[in-house]
Image (spheres, helix red, strand yellow):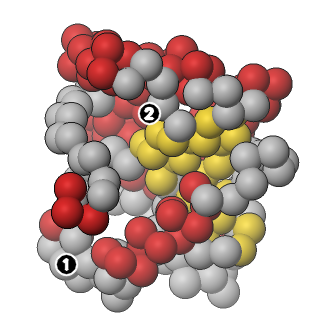
């Protein structure tokens, strides 16, 4: 990446660990003093084969720790650096499986995907994005959620129909939108989708 003119540095974070997240925020503060864009892309599926009545609460709790509390922890920790940037962007990488409108529509492709832990964690993440959007807009920080689509990654044993490049394109598009525009929306590619 340096050959392309980009200064890229690896920063490993365990979003379930206060210590790890705080150390990462401190490193960015010490090395750069600000953060322009934060993309929260942590996610685990949990026992996706279990029916809602059979999924263990401990498994659901682990999913929430990564998929919901992790992005909250990271956003709160990096918020001072986003404020230092003057204007900032936060993207919560959600899922169409978090859309209650889609999940409750019998003709929608996601209607039959009834995974208690994962789906509800992404619905909760959407609510987290909206809450942060409402608070942080007065600081010039834009917060939105995005569905990358069913992407072929290790997360789903490469069963997704979208490429990583296709998924990333929607996230990059969202990051490059005018930060002064209204925030608190949910997108798939370039379109707003229902919460």
Q: Earlier in the sequence, mark 2 or mark 1?
A: 2
Q: Residue at x 42, y 73 (%)?
A: 167
Depicted 62 relative to depicted 113: above or below: above
Whether residues under marks 2 and 1 lie with C-beta atoms below 8 angstroms apart, the answer is no
Depicted 32 relative to depicted 147: above or below: above
Count of labels in the image: 2
Q: Residue at x 51, y 63 (%)?
A: 171
- Residue 84 position, x and y percent, is 58, 19
**Residue annotated with mark 1:** 158
User: On the picture, is 180 further left or further right than 18?
Assistant: right
Q: What element carries label 2?
A: helix
Q: In this rendered view, identify the residue nearer to me: 125 or 34.
A: 34
- Residue 180 position, x and y percent, is 81, 45
- Identify the mark at residue 21; answer none if there is no mark: none
Q: In this rendered view, identify the residue nearer to me: 140 or 52.
A: 140
Residue 139 quadrant? top right
User: On the picture, is 157 further left or further right than 97?
Assistant: left
Q: What element carries label 1?
A: loop
**Residue annotated with mark 2:** 71
Is residue 143 among the parts visible in the rendering?
yes
User: On the picture, is 21 further left or further right than 130?
Assistant: left
Label 1 neighbourhood size at 10 Å, few (<14), some (14-19), many (20+)? few
Is residue 53 among the parts visible in the rendering?
no
Query: Could you tell me which quadrant the N terminus lies in?
Result: bottom left
Query: Could you tell me which quadrant the C terminus lies in?
Result: bottom right
Q: Which residue is drawn at 20% across and 56% down?
A: 2
Depicted 31 relative to depicted 148: above or below: above
């Amino acid at each position: 990446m340096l050959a392309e003119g980009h200064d890229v540095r690896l920063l490993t974070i365990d979003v379930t660990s206060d210590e790890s997240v705080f150390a990462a925020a401190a490193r960015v503060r010490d090395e750069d003093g600000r953060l322009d864009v934060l993309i929260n892309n942590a996610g685990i599926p949990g026992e996706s084969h279990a029916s809602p009545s059979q999924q263990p609460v401990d498994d659901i709790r682990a999913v929430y720790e990564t998929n919901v509390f992790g992005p909250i922890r990271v956003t709160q920790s990096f918020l001072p650096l986003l404020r230092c940037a003057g204007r900032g962007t936060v993207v919560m990488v959600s899922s169409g499986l978090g859309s209650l409108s889609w999940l409750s529509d019998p003709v929608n492709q996601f209607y039959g995907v009834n995974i208690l832990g994962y789906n509800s964690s992404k619905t909760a993440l959407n609510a987290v994005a909206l809450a942060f959007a409402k608070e942080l807009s007065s600081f010039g920080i834009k917060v939105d959620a995005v569905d990358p689509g069913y992407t072929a990654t290790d997360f789903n044993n490469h069963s997704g129909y979208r490429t990583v490049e296709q998924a990333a394109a929607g996230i990059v598009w969202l990051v490059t939108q005018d930060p002064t525009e209204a925030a608190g929306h949910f997108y798939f590619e370039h379109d707003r989708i229902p919460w």
